[in-house]
Image: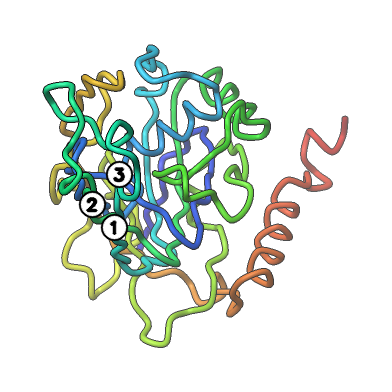
Amino acid sequence: MTVPQPPRQPGLLLRLAAPLQSWGEHSHFTQERDTASFPTKSGVLGLLSCALGRPRGQDNSDLRRLGLTVRIDRPGYVLRDLHTVGGGLAPKDTVRTAKGGNRGENRSTLYGHRLYLADAAFVCALTCPEEAVLDRCADALTTPRWPLYLGRRGCPPEGPVLLESSPDVLGSLLRLPLPARPRTPAAVTLLADRPLGWLPRHPEDTDDGSCPSSEVQDEPVDTASHRRVFRTRRLYRGSWHPPEQLYTNKLGADYLDDLARHLNAANVPSPDSPEAAV
């Protein structure tokens, strides 16, 4: 039986991991801020915009051509945090009202909640037929213009975001080592904005990822501060059962060391390759 192979496409591999991250999905300018269970496309493009030094509202039509595939290495768990705004301030410094005034002394403190993903880790494959766009993003992620954060400014990544630039990024995604296998073995979930029919099938899989499983409204159209507009995109969900040897059985710094060794070995030309002969 022929094993399906991912389409060969150039792209970038990004690792999005941190103690906390948050990818807003539904809330807009409210005191209750939610998070999706995975990096949204608007959030990832916002990360790239920070690296490139692009302010909100600047044309990002080149970034919108990027395809996004997310591998959920560690789903993490949702953390709910209470936030207060305006408490303990003089009346003239309290939160402004819609009419342009200030809130009264007895109503100066606003309460809200922020949801975060704690202890989550994702690997994202960005694809694009225009290699100039990929090169520009890779350079920016290596030397970002502005600090990078995962959804909110209080969520910096735990390490370098860019793992590698690859001529076969989806293949690299399936070859990248995973951390220790969970106590209860489970398939690894992949999410993409394109069909995932190229994933190896498993007898337990009920869906091959060739049809969209849902829709998400996270395709940015206009990112200006007060008129953000998002378009709906189809989301394809697939299950992947990695081979046993891909699990490193390590966590934390030990896993990152193994990951670095894998990437270094992958970037060393073989003795018979044209690069080695130069």
Name the residue type under label 1: Leu
Residue 2 place in picture, x, y as percent: 37, 58
Q: Secondary structure at mark 3?
A: loop
> Residue 115: which disc?
1
In this image, 14 relative to 199: left or right? Answer: right
Quote the CA–CA distance across marks 3 and 1: 20 Å
Q: Residue visible at 48% across and 30% down?
A: 48
Quote the CA–CA distance across marks 2 and 3: 21 Å
- Find the residue positioned furthest to the right: 278
* 2 and 3 marks in contact (CB < 8 Å): no
- Give the label, 2 or 3, closer to the camera: 3
Residue pointed to by mark 2: 34
* 3 and 1 marks in contact (CB < 8 Å): no
Name the residue type under label 3: Gly
Residue pointed to by mark 3: 86
| Quadrant holding the N terminus | bottom left
